[in-house]
Image (cartoon, grey):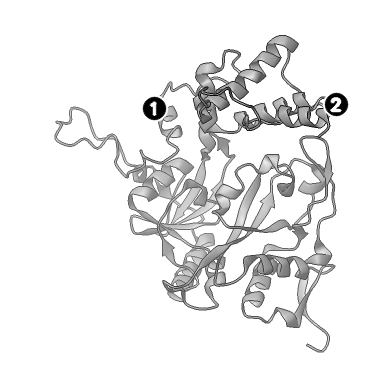
Amino acid sequence: MDPKDLQKLIEDDELGLLTVKPKGASIPTGDERLINSFQEITDFIKTAGREPEPSRTDMHEMKLHNRLKSFRNDEAKIEQLRPHDELKLLGEPQRIESIEDVFADDDLGLLNDGTDIFDLKFVPRETPQLPDYIAKRKPCKDFKSFAHLFKQCHAELTGGIRVLTRFTNETQINKGDFFVLKGVLVYVADEGTTQQLSHGHINARLRCIFENGTESDMLLRSLASALYKDGRRVTTPTDKLAKLVREVGDEDLQTGFIYVLKSLSDRAELRSMKHLYKIGFSRTAVEDRIKNASREVTYLMAPVEVVASFQCYNLNPHKFENLLHTFFGQACLDVDVFDAEGRSHAPREWFVAPIGIITKAVELLITEEILNYRYDAENQQIVERDGG
């Protein structure tokens, strides 16, 4: 082997697999190798006076740049390396300064056990009990404009189009959703500006309409806390579409999720496109799949919003996804998206079609009737094929 090629292999050997150890010398543990690789970045910065950059001519510097970037995106490695981070390359640790910070730092939801911290037991009350959020409700003056929505929701629950499920995450709360809170149906009529809290948590001021003719302007996280304690989620009509093939039993296999996303990009040309959606597939929960959307080309390098999710059983979701892409092929988005390195990409999973049309296409695909139809991109309609 050419000496230059051998040297390059050694330089790229981050795990030290090619390093010959003296006989009897101890082998570094995984933790030691991690610390040593981080120390190499520190030494570079001390020598160069700057962080390693994505150089196209110095592969060693490129390697250090990518390694540092990887460390910064891995919470577990950040905690492991923090004692060795003399240059504060991994940022400052999260400071807990208020009770809100304590709850915001609760990634595993350990504090959302349905227990009110003000509900004291076996302790004499010396101050009046804090009022429950119900006390903040007021008569809804325009309830007539919402009454038909509650009637329709009840009909869809009776017909099995909607079902009640356990509330599991605050990301399930969106404008237009229904929930059952303490036995009363509640509709999220509006959602104010979303605030991004620490550790991925969000909050926003909501307008919640209750079936008893009242309304409340509670915060999203307050509603989530109440639903954890005594509430249920009402699924959307699309939640059951992928289960129409057959009743799901213990022997049935969940193969993934087909999801529909809306882009929250700031790009003017994307914001001006009405009915722009991504149709994709994920083997894991959709919320987990899109966590890093703003750093991934397939999501247009921007945050996204989940519009619909179809749980797939006993079918090949890749083929399911490809058939939908083929069906909406004429409406495929044609734009260039640049990644963090400045390279151009052309994502092929974004389409211009109304969400109602996409939902209808999924239903036709499940019932195997989709072969009789095609998508008219110009008029944004599903029409019968000639002779179909």
Q: Residue at x 52, y 69 (%)?
A: 240
Does 38 sit left or right of 301 as displayed? left
The residue under label 2 is 57
Q: Quadrant of the N terminus?
A: top right
Against 263, is 64 above or below? above
Does 97 sit left or right of 345 as displayed? left
Locate residue 350, reporting x and y percent.
75, 56
Against 359, is 21 above or below? above
Locate residue 143, reporting x and y percent.
49, 58
Locate residue 236, reporting x and y percent.
53, 63
| Cα–Cα span, label 2 and label 1 | 50 Å
Against 209, is 27 above or below? above
Tell me the amino acid under the disc marked 1.
Ile
The residue under label 1 is 99
How busy is the neighbourhood of tag 2: few (under 14 within 10 Å), some, or many (20 plus)? few
Against 87, is 175 above or below? below
Based on the displayed image, in which of its 4 quarters is residue 278 positioned? bottom right
**285 or 268, nearer to the observer:** 285
**92 or 210, nearer to the observer:** 92
Does 199 sit left or right of 228 as displayed? right
- Could you tell me if residue 209 is visible in this image? yes
